[in-house]
Image (cartoon, rainbow, N blue to C red):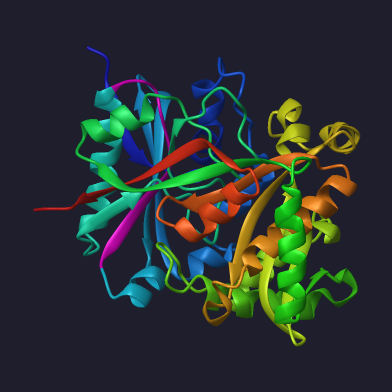
Amino acid sequence: MRSLEIRAVRGRADLDRFIKLPYSIYRDDPNWVAPLLFDVRRLLDRARHPFHRHADVEYFLALRDGEPVGRVAAIVNHAHNEFYGDKLGFFGLFECIDDPAVARALLDQAELWLRERGMDTVRGPMNLSTNEELTSPGVLIDGFDTPPSVMMTHSPPYYSRLLEGVGYEKSQDLLAYWVDGRNKPEHLVKGLERLKGRQNVTIRTLNKKRLKEEVQRIKDIYNSAWERNWGFVPMTEAELDHMASSLAPVVDPRLCAFAEVDGEPVGFLLELPDFNRALKPLKGRLFPFGLFRFLWNKRKINISRVITLGVRPEYRQRGIDAMLIMHVLTVGVDAGYVEGECSWILESNWQMRRGLERVGGRVYKTYRVYDKPLSG
């Protein structure tokens, strides 16, 4: 009988196996895009990444006869629990062969670790939180036939079966919309222009020469706009600075827009070129020669992803979200980004969903996040 061992990651060799396990899981999947190994190592670095200042994280490997066959991270996000006043633990970075016994052993170990730290419920996958996403939350439920957009999850169809088989139940579905910027309804374009004038709304793009001030504006809007959203946790200064430094080199200022009313920023939208199109051939390795391939492939990108859009609560129901979307669709097409993804959107966020559907958006991928009570 083949032996199965679940053990905590200790040392460089274990960490390397943890990080590189997905290469075996997805070796026959033509749509998987390997994340940059540098980014994965940076996220998992407890001493340097700001997420670990308010979270406890343990990484576990599943080994069968000494060979890695699964992995999972168990997470106590103290900032989340302090904000909500609950005892919710998380699991994330879940990867596993199609074997219920391996999945059960991995998740049993993560659940035990969380229960020992006082958690009464577990949610996941979170990779590692909604503020620090190596990839988006959840496992893919539909839309397996196309590659993921930048910073979005891709997973095998059997992951949902493995999770449900050990007692996990749906918490939320997260949706990805596909929008073709070349097909903007003319009547909607004209209507939003009239509405902008009546409400004294100005849409402007990011000023990279004043990046520090712009980042602070984004933070102020973010923590106000998302406060009542499922899964929201306020960003710390350190997390915001880390995010800004990570995105600054790759942000196209034309694709980051602010909405202002009487000169006051009330909303923003951030769109990124879909760098996964350029990263896919690199297999996670940017150095030493992947950088040249990336820069070459980057020139051909004509797809983008809207990764975040927020409007202060007191300025909602005024069409400002649609104005932002229409602005970046127009600017994006002019810049060569003719279509792309808007994600992730909560299935219950009907205001955002209707706004996207008004401009021709359609749901083309669904991701599911699961919950499970921790008893005993």
| Vertical relation: 15 (above or below) 250 | above
Residue at point 53%, 50% (across, down): 344
Residue at point 40%, 30% (across, down): 70
- Residue 332 in the image: x percent, y percent? 82, 49
The answer to whether residue 271 is seen in the rendering is no
Q: What is the residue that sits farthest to the front in this orientation?
A: 187
- Residue 134 in the image: x percent, y percent? 57, 48
Give the quadrant of the N terminus: top left
Return the residue nearer the eye: 86 or 202: 202
Return the residue nearer the eye: 143 or 299: 143
Q: What is the residue that sits farthest to the left in this orientation?
A: 376
| Vertical relation: 215 (above or below) 73 | below
- Residue 114 in the image: x percent, y percent? 26, 56
The answer to if 313 sits in the magenta stretch is no
The answer to whether residue 23 is seen in the rendering is yes
* Residue 242 in which image quadrant: bottom right
Q: What secondary structure prevails in the magenta region?
A: strand
| Vertical relation: 297 (above or below) 239 | above
Residue at point 41%, 62% (across, down): 231
Q: Which residues are magenta?
A: 87-99
